[in-house]
Amino acid sequence: MVTTMAKVHGVERALRTNIRRGKSCRRARLQVCARKPKAVEPEPTENDGKYIAAGAGGTLAAGVCAWSTFTLKTTGCGLPPGPGGALGALEGVSFLALLGVVGWSAYTKVKTGKGLPPGPYGLLGAAEGLSYLVLLAYIVVLGINYVQLGYIPGAVPDNNCFG
């Protein structure tokens, strides 16, 4: 009886709300104006930690690669080696991580027909999208540099860059 009363009260309230908004519900006895169901948060899974780490690392790597791409376009060389080669090492590891995310995404797309899942907080989806975007920008900048300067800078400092 309580559940029936609650249902009737909810229907009554929904009808009153819709009528106030200028909407009418035809066949009020048979059909209630549909309400959107409340979003249910997915329960955490064992892969959430991995997805958060991969998403955060991939997003950070895409940021470093974007910085390197911008530096390559403006100076003709990538990031400087930095103190003890730390900045150059960060750049190299970031490009490897970027290629890892793109490779993982492509593999998943071929196997499942979908890209990577968005992951918690959308980090993995952001990392995937940024990785493709930065990789495309890097390829375009490499082509422009080759046409304008006549060379593509190597991974290690040489006579053209930081030599």
Image (cartoon, rainbow, N blue to C red):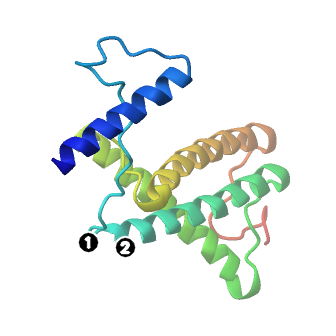
Q: Are marks 2 and 1 in contact (CB under 8 Å)?
A: yes
Element type at marker 2? helix
User: In percent of the image, x 73 and y 61: which residue is there?
Assistant: 78
Amino acid carrying mark 1 in the image? Glu
Q: Nearer the viewer, residue 118 or 147?
A: 118
Q: Secondary structure at mark 1?
A: loop
Mark 2 closeness class: few <14, some 14–19, many ≥20 residues within 10 Å: few
Find residue 146 and report its image quarter: top right
The residues tagged by marks 2 and 1 sit, at their Cα atoms, a distance apart of: 7 Å
Q: How many dots with numbers?
A: 2
Q: Is residue 25 above or below residue 10?
A: above
Residue 88 placed where, x, y %? 67, 74
Residue position marked by numbered label 1 in the rendering: 46
At horizontal 51% and vertical 62% (from top left) the residue drawn is 58
The image quarter in which residue 91 lies: bottom right
Q: Quadrant of residue 153?
A: bottom right
Q: Residues within 10 Å of mark 1 (few under 14, many from 20)?
A: few
> How far across and how far down the image is residue 71, in percent?
78, 57
* Relative side of 96 to 68, left or right: left
Residue identified by numbered label 2: 49
